[in-house]
Structures are given as structure tokens and as C-alpha cells.
Image (tube, rainbow, N blue to C red):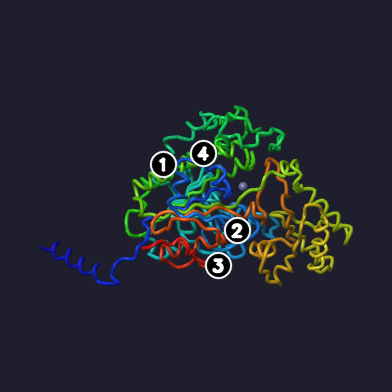
Amino acid sequence: MKKTFLAVVLLILTSIPGMAQLKRPKLVVGIVVDQMRPDYLTRFYDQLGDGGFKKLMSDGFTMWNIHYNYIPTYTGPGHASIYSGTTPRYHGIVGNDIYYRDAKRSEYCVNDTFNVVGNGIAEIGKGMSPHRLITTNICDELKLCNNKRSKIISISLKDRAAILSGGHLADGVFWFDQKTGNFVTSSYYSTQLPSWVVAFNDRNQAFSYINEKWTPLYEGGYYSDCITDTTICAILKTGEKILPLFPHNLQLPLNSRDAKYSLLYKSPLANTLLTDLAIDAIKNGDLGKDNNSDFLAISYSSTDVVGHLYGPHSKEIKDTYLRLDRDLERLINTLNQTIGEGNYVLFLTADHGIPESPQYLANQKIPAGYLYHKALITHASEFLNTRFSAGKWVDTLMNDQFFLNRNLISEKGLDLRTVQVQLADFLMQQKGIAFAYTASEMNETEFNSSLAMRIQNGFQPKHSGDVLMVMEPGYFEYEEGYLVEHGSGYNYDCNVPLIWFGQNIKKGESWQLHYITDIAPTLSMILRIKFPSACIGNPITEIKGQE
Ligand SMILES: [Zn+2]
């Protein structure tokens, strides 16, 4: 009798206009593919399967004209911006490494003094946290909206990608430990791993993957559009060349000092391992079970490592994406079986793109080149010594920004702005450098367009340099061990794909311009929660289907 009464009351309540529950997804899945350009979707289209990228594109909404609106385009700032809807100027992650002027040292963007949890090694004080992210992000807002009843899990091969996606309040943030092959966390989040991650680590899948060789998925003809020139290759600090020649061994030589699983990390099999973990998270991580929307953030890093080592037109990068396509198919199938088709929203984007290798472009007579880090510091120092007087004028050069020795400048009674302007003028005369802006200009002028605006969106007075360089297209500051590097404000680094898929997402595509900072406010609308604190983007309305 009681049950019947309750059922009647419930029926009446749900039939009163305005009393029906707002429709929200049970789960949001955010996928970031590290270093992915939109043209990969078209270049590899014919060889993609039906259930991965193609399913997202055919049943979802693909946006081709999404851009980063700041410099530098690196992984830490990229993930922070996607999830907080703002730029480094406002979220604080101005680079993968952040410079502290007073201490005259840089800190890794997620470094902290917590402990590492989950690899069986006592790594005290090496645990990480998102404390340098000074705004809330979309996952924080989801936690704040319902007294933390939503569940947030964030996973990646890279610690910074997992941490800066998950935000400050995540339930579980896990990344790959190259020493042990385990997924680990920091005591900032929890002093022990949840049972489903312990069970995953106990299976030791990383070990079985390193016993496989990385061979191409398909026969040679599939890769005939790729560059196989072995003279265009990365050269490690040791002098060793990274040759684009399959098969790639994933086991280290016995005498190597590198971490045991470091070659796995440099192969697409690590993305497959991450997919295995994502599938366990969906099945056993208590996601999408009730009316509080949950969030699963996944960031695939192997794409970035392979891109740096072999370049965007290598067989290796194509094989990495064809494998990722299969991984996505497994992931989507698991979501449909476990959460249910139409009960979740998925988006896929990238934290930055990548140019063609300068070495390759130069061979094709396209202007491009490398600027050597040490030589840049030497030339700038020599100029300042000659222009002013002998002294250690440059504290450091990072993220294409010169940090000047401000103590020396004031000791010598010089005006900071004058020294900045002189150095900027000198740098702009150098081959490969297009523009150089001063911190004083950034503080005094509001730039509304083009590269200057992008520099300003990445500029924060506390942690940005005195002179900020913009290289010419095709040029980058060279770091040993890489064939190619990203970080610029040009299209090859700034233009990334964005695909939306799932509950109440329209089918289609758009060439409309949007910025990366529009993703988080769109998620706010989908989840019907407030915007992250420092969000400057606007919701993307084209994707909204009929309710
Ligand atoms: Zn990278």
C-alpha cells in the first residue's frame, strides 16, 4: 500500500511542469590527444576503422577551426586552458616549467612536496599537486555544485596532463611511472591507490607490452604517404640517432640507465595501456552510476613523444594514430555497454599541434631552422656586455623569454625598461626571430589581435620574462633529443581538432572560428553548472541538438 502511494506521489511530482529533472549527462569523458593536428583526421581518414575517430566524426560534431589563443603552446598550459576556459595569464600555468624571479630558479608546473603513492618506492616529497593552477577548472566546478557528490577521475601517461585536467578536488588522478610500469598518484589526492588501480597494476600489463616489439599495424602500402628519409631524425644528447626504422624494440639494453619502461612510453603501446586503464575506470571506478554527473579525463601522451622523435609525417606517427583509433573504438564500446549510448558526452581535442621538422622544410626550400638555446644566451649576453658593461645580465632563457638580472640592472642604476627595449631591438635583428616584446609593453598596452595578443594571453607579470620572443614561422628554439618542437603561436601549433559526441550533441561539422577557451564554458552549459572562476571563453552553441 505504502509503495503504491509513493509511486503515485512520484508520478504526480514528475508530471508537474517544471518539476521534471534537468537532463544532464551521467558522465563526461574528456579526451586530450597530446600534439594532435586536425589534418591527421583527414590524412589518415581512409585507413581509420568505423568505430573510433570515424564514429565520433559521423555521429558527433567536428570543429575544424579551433585555435589556441596564447603562447606558449605546451602540454601544461594546454591542459590547464582546456579545462579552465582561460589562458596562462589568468590560470597561472605559464609553461611546463615556471620561473621564480626571487629564488632565481624554475619549478616544474605541478611540483609539490607530497609523496608518490603506488609504485612501491619511497619517493618522499616528490608527489605533485595542482597548486600552481590559480583558478577553478570545470572538474572543480562540478565538485563544488553538489557538495562533492560528482566523481572525478583523471588519467594520463604524463603527470602534468592528468593533474591539470583533474583540478583541485579530483577523487583520483593517476599517471604512468616509467620506473615500475605502474600507474601512481600523489598523497595530495590520497595516501593509497583505490582497489581498481591496485588490481590493474597487479596485472603488470606494462611488462607484457615491453616484451612485444613495436611493428607497424599494416603492411607497407598503408604508409606510402609517409616520409622515410633516415637523414631527418632526432639525435639524443648521447649522440645516438633515433631512426625511423621498424620494428622498434621496447626493451632497454641491460646496461641502460634509463627507466625500465621509458621505451614503452615512447611508443603507441603506452596509449593502449592507458586505454586498458580507462576501461577499468569505466567498469570499476564507480562512474556514471547516479544522477550526479561524473567526469573521466583521459590524456594520451604517446602521440606527443612519437611526434617529437619521428615528426608528423613519419610512418611512426601514422601507425600511432591508427592504433589510437583502435583504442578509441574499444573505449567507445565500453562506454556504450557500461554507461549506455546517449547517457554520456564525450569531447576530443589536443593540447597543441606540431610543425613539420625544420630540417625537412629547409630541404624543401621552405624557410625554417633551429635556434640554439645556448647560442641565444651567449649572443644576448655579449650584446648587453658591450652595450652596458660586463656583468651577468641574463638570469635564464625559457619558453622563448629572456629573464634579466634585475638586481644587476638596479645596482648599475639602469632603467629596466631601457635594458628590455635594447635587448628586444637586438634580438629582432637576428635571423629566425620575427618580433620581441618587452614585459613593460605587455603591462602597459592592451593587444587585441594577432601574435601580440597571443603573447599577452600567455603573459603573467610574476612569472613571465623581460623580453618575449616570437620566432619566424618554421623556427624553434632547439632542444637536444628532439627532431621537432611546438610552443609557437602559429597555426601548426595552435590549430587543433575538437569533436563533440553523445547526449544532446548535434551531428555535423563546423568551420566557424572558436578558441580552446570555449570548451570549458560549453561543458558548464552541458552540465548546467557555473563557469570556472577565471573563464574568458564563450559556450559553443552550434553543437546543441534538440532536447
Ligand atoms: Zn610535446
Mark 3 residue type: Ile
Quarter of the image for the N terminus: give it: bottom left
Q: Residue at x 36, y 54 (%)?
A: 342
How far apart are the two marked residues, 3 and 2, measured between alpha carbons?
Answer: 13 Å
- Residue 140 lies, in percent from the top left, at 46, 61
- Asked whether 35 or 79 is in front, the reply is 35
Q: Which residue was labeled with disc 3?
A: 536
Q: Is residue 189 visible?
A: no
- Residue 189 lies, in percent from the top left, at 46, 53
| Mark 3: secondary structure | loop
Residue 460 left/right relative to 268? right
Q: Residue at x 23, y 69 (%)?
A: 13
How far apart are the two marked residues, 1 and 4, measured between alpha carbons?
Answer: 36 Å
- Residue 334 lies, in percent from the top left, at 38, 44
Which numbered dot is residue 47? 4
Quadrant housing residue 365: top right
Q: Which residue was labeled with disc 1?
A: 198
How far apart are the two marked residues, 4 and 2, measured between alpha carbons?
Answer: 28 Å
> Which of the marked residues, 4 or 2, is nearer the chain's N terminus?
4
**Label 1 Cα crowd, 10 Å radius (few <14 / some 14-19 / many 20+):** some
Which residue is most to the top? 254
